[in-house]
Image (cartoon, helix red, strand yellow):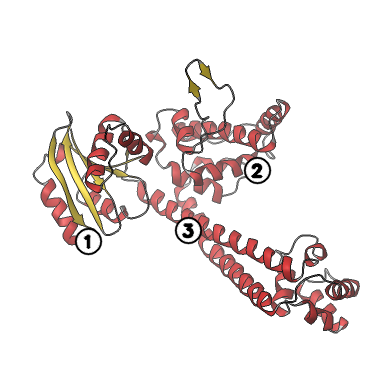
């Protein structure tokens, strides 16, 4: 076999080719991330036996996606490798050096030493699903940051508002109130009847005259700053949150439609909805890439970290968290939900709690059990049937 390593970057890439015994067949060369650069790559690769060629690159960022599509269209075998593998191979070198040209050789060598994940022809739906799930996760993260900022602004402007809304300030009634009047002085000056009608309307009758009177009293006695700049920031934070909500309402149905088309067996897992299975499936992709559940656990970062030195071997370690963060997040969330729907998982979670593990540790163990079940389901194409 001939192994081509490509170090991917935003504007240009570096490629090199080596034989099975490590002989350099094509010295590292730079080609641009455009059609002329891709054509140069094709020209250089045409000197090699295409049937014996494997083109590999690290599975990082999005800069290589167009190159992957181009190579697949020209019928090259394209594979991905875990960047942790190239990092460990680079560290094993006697001289510490890192350049794009060296990295292309390291990537090619990693294909020989560590193996790789082949890209299948049916990966297009999975790639689209992964893109949608990544988009959704980014929106959720930005919305979370905006909500945290909003809490900080309200803490300084009108801290007593947190106690007034028993469900917290992240509800529609709270947002509408703060958008209309984010200053304590403005709320305290509002006519009681007008405030009552407003609260009753936006809450669909959940607030009464008594609530309006209490809110005005809280505003009059507030220790907040009553700062116009904070009022502006509160309004902008709410606008951002509402924008993110709108974006989520747009992307989530697209994920659901694609999952309906894929029709994976993991949709049969009770209590976890559609989005979490979509996140899990989009990252795992073709489960045949993993020869055992242990390798899939390691890919998710749910495997225990190994701590050994001399004769010492730690008997109790935390999860490594070196795998895919989105997969790990989805599994933890799914484990929480399924432990309320499945007796098998509820008992397993309770067992871990009885062993003295805290909630999050027990949930991590439950997530590992769930991933083993998912591996079994995907490899055998069977639906969830545990009680």
* Of the two numbered discs 3 and 1 in the rendering, the one whose residue sits closer to the viewer: 1
Residue 23 visible here: yes
Q: Secondary structure at mark 2?
A: helix
Can you name the residue that lies furthest to the right here? 210
Residue placed under numbered mark 3 in the picture:
135
Residue placed under numbered mark 1 in the picture:
34
Real-space CA distance between mark 3 and mark 1, rounded to the nearest whole angstrom = 25 Å
Q: Is residue 89 above or below residue 101?
A: above
Horizontal side, residue 197 vs residue 148: left or right: right
Disc with the residue nearer the chain's start (3 vs 1): 1
* Of the two numbered discs 2 and 3 in the rendering, the one whose residue sits closer to the viewer: 3
Disc with the residue nearer the chain's start (2 vs 3): 3
For image coordinates 29% across by 54% down, the residue present is 9
For image coordinates 61% across by 67% down, the residue present is 241
For image coordinates 70% across by 63% down, the residue present is 170
Residue placed under numbered mark 2 in the picture:
337
Q: Determine contact: label 2, label 1, CB under 8 Å.
A: no
Can you name the residue that lies furthest to the left here? 47
Real-space CA distance between mark 2 and mark 3, rounded to the nearest whole angstrom = 23 Å
- The image quadrant where one finds the N terminus is top left
């Amino acid at each position: 076999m001939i192994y081509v390593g490509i170090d991917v970057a935003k504007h240009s890439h570096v490629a090199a080719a080596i034989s099975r015994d490590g002989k350099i067949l094509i010295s590292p060369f730079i080609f641009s991330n455009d059609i002329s650069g891709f054509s140069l790559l094709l020209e250089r690769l045409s000197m090699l036996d295409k049937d014996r060629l494997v083109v590999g690159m690290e599975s990082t960022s999005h800069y290589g996606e167009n190159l992957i599509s181009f190579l697949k269209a020209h019928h090259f075998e394209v594979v991905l490798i875990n960047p942790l593998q190239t990092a460990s191979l680079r560290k094993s070198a006697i001289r510490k050096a890192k350049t794009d040209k060296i990295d292309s050789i390291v990537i090619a060598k990693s294909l020989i030493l560590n193996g790789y994940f082949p890209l299948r022809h049916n990966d297009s739906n999975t790639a689209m699903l992964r893109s949608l799930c990544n988009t959704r996760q980014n929106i959720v993260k930005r919305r979370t940051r905006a909500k945290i900022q909003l809490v900080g602004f309200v803490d300084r402007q009108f801290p007593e508002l947190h106690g007034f809304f028993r469900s917290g300030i992240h509800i529609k009634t709270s947002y509408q109130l703060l958008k209309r009047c984010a200053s304590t002085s403005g709320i305290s000056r509002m006519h009681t009847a007008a405030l009552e009608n407003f609260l009753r309307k936006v809450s669909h009758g959940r607030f009464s005259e008594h609530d309006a009177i209490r809110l005005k009293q809280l505003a009059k006695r507030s220790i907040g700053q009553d700062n116009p700049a904070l009022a502006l920031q509160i309004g902008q934070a709410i606008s951002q949150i509402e924008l993110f909500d709108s974006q989520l309402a747009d992307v989530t149905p697209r994920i659901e439609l694609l999952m309906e088309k894929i029709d994976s067996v993991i949709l049969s897992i009770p209590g976890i909805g559609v989005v979490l299975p979509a996140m899990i499936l989009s990252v795992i992709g073709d489960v045949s890439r993993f020869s055992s559940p242990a390798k899939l656990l390691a890919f998710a970062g749910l495997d225990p970290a190994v701590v050994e030195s001399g004769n010492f071997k730690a008997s109790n370690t935390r999860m490594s968290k070196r795998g895919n963060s989105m997969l790990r997040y989805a599994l933890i969330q799914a484990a929480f939900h399924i432990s309320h729907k499945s007796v098998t998982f509820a008992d397993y979670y309770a067992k871990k709690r009885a062993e003295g593990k805290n909630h999050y540790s027990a949930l991590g163990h439950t997530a590992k059990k769930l991933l083993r079940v998912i591996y079994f389901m995907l490899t055998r194409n069977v639906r969830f049937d545990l009680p």
